[in-house]
Image (cartoon, rainbow, N blue to C red):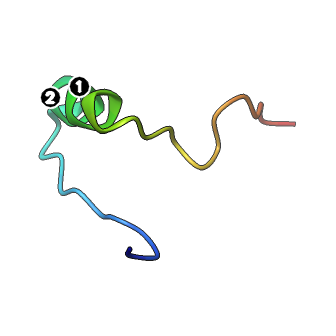
Amino acid sequence: GVPGLHFYTMNQAAPVLAICERLGLTPADAGLTAS
């Protein structure tokens, strides 16, 4: 495995989110809210 992935989104978040979803990945900060 790898410790992490980095995508350059170029203001195109939807395709990157779709790739992550298809890979079964979730953002590291999923479910967190800013305080």
Residue most extreme to the front: 1
Q: Please tell me whether mark 1 sits on a helix, a strand or a loop.
A: helix
**Picture coordinates of residue 15, whole percent (x, y):** 14, 28
**Picture coordinates of residue 2, whole percent (x, y):** 38, 76
Q: Residue at x 77, y 31 (%)?
A: 33
**Picture coordinates of residue 16, whole percent (x, y):** 21, 37
Q: Please tell me whether mark 2 sits on a helix, a strand or a loop.
A: helix
Q: Residues within 10 Å of mark 1 (few under 14, many from 20)?
A: few
Identify residue type, mark 2.
Pro
Q: 19 and 7: which one is in front?
A: 19
Q: Quadrant of the C terminus?
A: top right
Q: Residue at x 50, y 38 (%)?
A: 26
Q: Which residue is mark 1?
A: 18
Tag on residue 1?
none
* 13 sits to left or right of 25: left
Give the mark count.
Answer: 2
Q: Quadrant of the N terminus?
A: bottom left
Q: Quadrant of residue 21?
A: top left
Q: Quadrant of residue 14?
A: top left
Q: 8 and 23: which one is in front?
A: 23
Q: Quadrant of residue 4?
A: bottom left
Q: Residues within 10 Å of mark 2 (few under 14, many from 20)?
A: few
Disc 2 to disc 1, how far (Cα)?
Answer: 5 Å
Residue most extreme to the right: 35
Q: Which residue is mark 2?
A: 15
User: CB under 8 Å between callouts 2 and 1?
Assistant: yes
**Picture coordinates of residue 34, whole percent (x, y):** 78, 36
* 8 sits to left or right of 31: left
* 14 sits to left or right of 28: left
Identify residue type, mark 1.
Ala
Q: Residue at x 31, y 37 (%)?
A: 20
